[in-house]
């Protein structure tokens, strides 16, 4: 299923975001504050992932996209990259059954070619096992970059279209990694930095941005609720004026559904 984009149609605005995208940042600093090696922060971060997935299911969020490893994170020391890959393998081995029992559809999005055969096998097995689930779609962005995503979509477009007719938004959007999800309503970045770091460049066009100093290993259901509270106070205008929204109460009401 493809969704209309926020720039071609005004979406229905619900009190609970349908799609939340999170940059899980601050693991290294969390560990350093405790005189622990950085990887201890990554290990602890897996617990925050569990808590966030659970909280999203309970709150009726439909899509959760987590930035686990960026296309630029290969620049880190080899030992840290290796540990992150091992953690990824372990998480897949340990968590997929539980995700499946909880009705979660798992997708790994990113350039998977750079991962070894063992990881690729676990990824495709996890995706196949959970593909019929409908409660929550959990997208893990791994070796993902927003520019890579747009480029791979453009290259597919060039391969698949035998014409030089102008392309429209939908032609490109339907070839992006998250083509089967509505654009994120809410973006959260933990760890205090206020930047996008090459995450979902196309999809964040009208997403509400929320930055918190909370480090990812400390993120939990209460922190998620604080982000959703902030989201509920936003006026999502999609280019219109505030007056348009308040004058046309009837139309606005049809846009706001719990
Ligand atoms: C985020 O935490 C996890 C990954 C990028 C893999 P960091 O490792 O970036 O933690 P800080 O930003 O150094 O504290
Ligand atoms: C962004 O965090 C990527 C992930 C959380 C996976 P980084 O810690 O890599 O971002 P920068 O380098 O500080 O922008
Ligand atoms: Mg960081």
Image: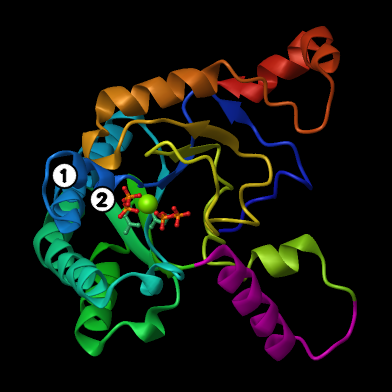
Q: Residue furthest front?
A: 35
Magenta span includes 160? yes
User: Which picture quadrant has residue 147?
Assistant: bottom right
Front residue of 114 and 248? 114
The image position of residue 251, as x and y in percent, is 76, 18
Which one is in front, 115 or 181? 115
Per the image, the residue denoted by label 1 is: 47
Q: Residue furthest right?
A: 165
User: Majority secondary structure of the magenta segment?
Assistant: helix
Residue 80 against residue 252 in the figure, above or below:
below
**In the displayed structure image, the side of residue 134 where residue 118 appears, left or right:** left
Q: CA distance from mark 1 to mark 2?
A: 15 Å
Residue drawn 28% across the image and 77% down it: 124
243, above or below 139, in the image: above
Crowd band around label 1 with a 10 angstrom C-alpha radius: few (<14), some (14–19), many (20+): some
Q: Nearer the viewer, residue 247 or 93?
A: 93
Location of ligand 2 given as a quarter of the image:
bottom left
Q: Give the magenta part as a residue range.
A: 145-165
* Residue appearing at x 35%, y 47% in the figure: 24
User: Which of pointers 1 and 2 lies earlier in the amino acid sequence?
Assistant: 2
């Amino acid at each position: 299923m493809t969704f209309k984009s926020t720039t071609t149609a005004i979406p229905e605005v619900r009190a609970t975001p349908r799609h939340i995208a999170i940059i899980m940042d601050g693991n290294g600093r969390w560990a350093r504050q405790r005189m622990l090696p950085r990887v201890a922060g990554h290990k602890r971060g897996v617990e925050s992932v569990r808590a966030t997935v659970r909280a999203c299911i309970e709150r009726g969020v439909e899509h959760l996209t987590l930035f686990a490893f960026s296309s630029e994170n290969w620049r880190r020391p080899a030992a840290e990259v290796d540990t992150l890959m091992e953690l990824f393998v372990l998480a897949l081995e340990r968590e997929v059954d539980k995700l499946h029992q909880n009705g979660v559809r798992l997708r790994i999005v990113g350039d998977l070619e750079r991962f070894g055969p063992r990881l690729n096998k676990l990824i495709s097995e996890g995706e196949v096992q959970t593909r019929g689930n409908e409660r929550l779609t959990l997208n893990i962005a791994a070796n993902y970059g927003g520019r890579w995503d747009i480029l791979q979509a453009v290259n597919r477009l060039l391969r698949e279209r035998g014409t030089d007719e102008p392309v429209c938004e939908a032609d490109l959007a339907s070839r992006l990694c998250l083509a089967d999800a509505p654009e994120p309503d809410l973006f959260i970045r933990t760890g205090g930095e206020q930047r996008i770091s090459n995450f979902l460049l196309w999809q964040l066009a009208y997403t509400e941005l929320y930055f918190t100093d909370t480090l990812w290993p400390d993120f939990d259901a209460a922190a998620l609720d604080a982000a959703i509270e902030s989201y509920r106070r936003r006026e999502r205008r999609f280019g219109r004026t505030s007056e348009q929204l308040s004058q046309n109460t009837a139309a606005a009401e049809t846009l706001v559904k719990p």
